Amino acid sequence: MRVEHTIVCYGDNLGYHHGAKYQILRAYDNWYSKKDASICVVTDKPEFFESYPCRLLELDPEKLHQWSLGGTQHFGIKLQGILWALRTSPAKCVLALDTDMYWIKDPSRVADKVTDSSIAMYRNEGHVYKTNNLSIKRFEEGLKDKSFDTSCGQYSLSHHSQMWASNILGLNQSHSELLEYSFELFSTLEPHVEAHTVEQYSIAEAARILHFEKYQAHRYLSNWSSTGRKNYVTPVLDEFFHRYGENNFNEHLLNWRSIKIKRPIIKFINQKLNKTLRRT
């Protein structure tokens, strides 16, 4: 097995689980059913994927509590879920995507970039020091002039520290240590930074410290991660799975192309107008 497509989805918001299903359907129909690939879903709701051609790893309450740092930061579940999938995968390479992402180009070309010394991430968002990005600036504010004991020595913010988005994470079987250290950094730094991006920062920093190169894979993907797109797509997916049921994979595969992920221009304009009016 060469590649395993991996998704971590959990919680009571059906939008995440429906997003995972759309992602699977699109990738399976376009690529995975024709190539040496498999699919893994790490979830607390395995019943939603029973008819899907997936390897299922069930998140129990103990894992959810422990991996989310006692329920304080759920992004730790993503890190540990991907690590679990990697350790148990029959594939050489694991490509893990957030539930609001989908492939628009052949994912095997991203897998080709993943080696023992390199990983794939979504995009480089720039250096932390002296950034103009207010969200990234919180890392300088929270970590500057601080030092932390870690298993790889003393950690402190560096002028080489960068923020990389982790909407996709491409790894191979030699990268377990990278994810383990990422979770250690995440657990250590999360209380000191007022941002929801500590998980992806920790992956980028672990890769820097352990001397892994990072490949930008954003050109191979599209998404509905913005608030406006998510507000449009969520009910569209909900309607599709209400019509065809939650667990009829064959029916889903026949009809997934009827799902219109891109917003009609009139919907986009109306959302922008409503947003402007709310500000006045």
Image (spheres, rainbow, N blue to C red):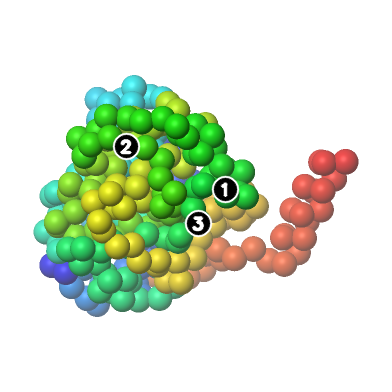
Which residue is the extreme one toward the right? Answer: 280
Secondary element at tag 1: loop
Q: Earlier in the sequence, mark 1 or mark 2?
A: 1
Left or right: where 155 falls relative to 83: right
Disc nearer the start of the sequence (1/3): 3
- The front one of 101 and 20 is 101
User: Residue 4: x percent and y percent?
Assistant: 22, 61
Residue 231 visible somewhere in the drawing:
no
| Residue matched to label 2 | 155
Q: Nearer the viewer, mark 1 or mark 3?
A: 1
Instruction: Give the class, few, some or many, for how many residues have Cα within 10 Å of label 3's Cα (few <14, many ≥20).
Output: few
Cα–Cα gap, marks 1 and 2:
19 Å
Q: Which mark is residue 130?
A: 1
- List x then y, in percent, for residue 265: 72, 67
Q: Which residue is labeled 3 in the image? A: 125
Could you classify mark 1 by the number of other residues whose Cα lies within 10 Å: few (under 14), some (14-19), or many (20 or more)?
few
* Tag 3: amino acid: Glu
**Along the viewing direction, whichever of 8 and 214 lies nearer the viewer:** 214
At label 2, counting other C-alpha atoms closer than 10 Å, the crowd grade (few under 14, some 14-19, many 20 or more) is some
- Quadrant in which the C terminus is drawn: top right
- Identify which residue is drawn at 18% across, 73% down: 36
Q: Outermost residue, top direction?
A: 70
